[in-house]
Image: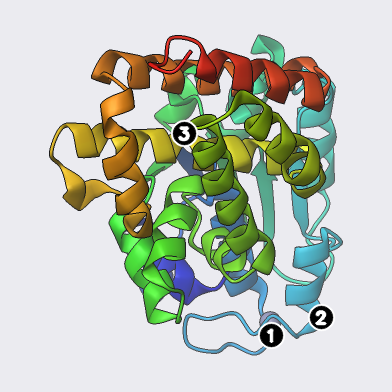
Amino acid sequence: MSWEILEINQPHVAKMISNSMRKGRIAHAYLFEGQKGTGKKEAALLFAKRLFCLTNLYKEPCETCVNCRRIQSGNHPDVHFVTPDGNSIKKQQIEQLQEEFTKTAVESNRKLYIIEHADQMTVQAANSLLKFLEEPSEKTVAILLTEQFHRILPTIVSRCQILSFHPLPTERICAYLQEHGVPRQLAILAARVTNNVEEALRLSQDDWFAQARKIVIQLYEALNSEYVQALLVIQQHWLSHFANKEQMHIGLDLLLYLYNDLLYVLLGEEQHIAYGDCMEQFQRSRFLYSEKQIAQHMKVILQAKARLHTNMNPQLLMEQLVLQLREGSAFV
Ligand SMILES: [Zn+2]
């Protein structure tokens, strides 16, 4: 991630950090809170690079100096990371960090530590950290990251400057992708699949994604004609294209948005649809479904997504889904 991207993704956060750097008033502790995928860790790394970068460019860290590169790879001697050991961050881990920080900075006059999933600290670890935060050293910066703000001890929260990360509106991501030459029909889907601008850009520029979209439409058409046809699409195209769990999630999301579009068509809200080029198919199949049935279809797709976590055989999962999507439809 670049600072420019951070300014698009999280303008408030970027501005707060830039201002405090400009005024030389960097807080001793920051708490970055917000949903998964809002770029908290990337922002923490960027912040660290800006503090340590040797090139001293305006805002954007150079990414090429030895400090930027070592921060990126997690090897800078004055930048430390704490991540949960198993399910929690243990007291011992915080104590190790403190011990490390009693030494003077190795190469610079500053030290920084980033605690990921800070909400997963045990009570003992949190109390240990609290003592650490209560005796701030002039040149120490702490960045705590969390997706579960409400689970952080209030005493810790009160010692941090809180920066909230918000999911980016789909329309903003979509506009950004289109500015980068992505056709709208792919941009709108990529923007819905991920809240992360960079990931959305990478995805929408990948041929795999355009092909994924085609297969999903193919499956939808087959589902509206013959059951056997739908099974063929699964066996011949789907399983090889959506070859791992992550890809399966994307495939099922794309299918979900397709049914969501059909719902929009039924409700007369065509302006919201993502598959603009499928209007003809929607008009043809709209009479096959009631709103309630489409809602039911969307529910079973979400259930299939949940079942991905149980390590169910993908072929079985998809065949069951096809069966469920056929059930309750007008043509069964
Ligand atoms: Zn640099």
Q: Residue 54 carries which label?
A: 1
Mark 1 sits near ligand 1, with its Cβ under 8 Å away: yes
Q: How far, Cα to Cα, is label 1 from label 2?
A: 8 Å
Judge whether 108 appears above or below 151 on screen: below
Query: Of the residues shown, which amino acid type is indicated by label 3?
Result: Leu
Mark 2 sits near ligand 1, with its Cβ under 8 Å away: yes
Judge whether 275 appears above or below 128 on screen: below
Where residue 307 sits in the image (x, y, percent)? 68, 16
Camera-near label (3 vs 1) is 3
Query: Of the residues shown, which amino acid type is indicated by label 1?
Result: Leu
Q: How far, Cα to Cα, is label 3 from label 1?
A: 47 Å
The tag earlier along the polypeptide, 3 or 1, is: 1
Where residue 225 sits in the image (x, y, percent)? 51, 32
Q: How crowded is mark 2: few (under 14 residues within 10 Å), some or many (20 or more)?
A: some
Secondary structure beneath dot 3 equals helix
Q: How far, Cα to Cα, is label 2 from label 3?
A: 45 Å
The tag earlier along the polypeptide, 1 or 2, is: 1
Q: Which mark is residue 66?
A: 2
Q: Are circles 3 and 1 on residues that touch, CB within 8 Å?
A: no
Q: Residues within 10 Å of mark 3 (few under 14, many from 20)?
A: many
Q: Are circles 1 and 2 on residues that touch, CB within 8 Å?
A: yes
How many numbered marks appear? 3
Where residue 106 sits in the image (x, y, percent)? 84, 65
Q: Mark 3 points at which residue?
A: 256
Judge whether 28 appears above or below 187 on screen: above
The residue under the point 65% across, 11% down is: 123
Is residue 163 at all visible to an observer of this figure?
yes
**Looking at the image, which is closer to me, 22 or 263?**
263
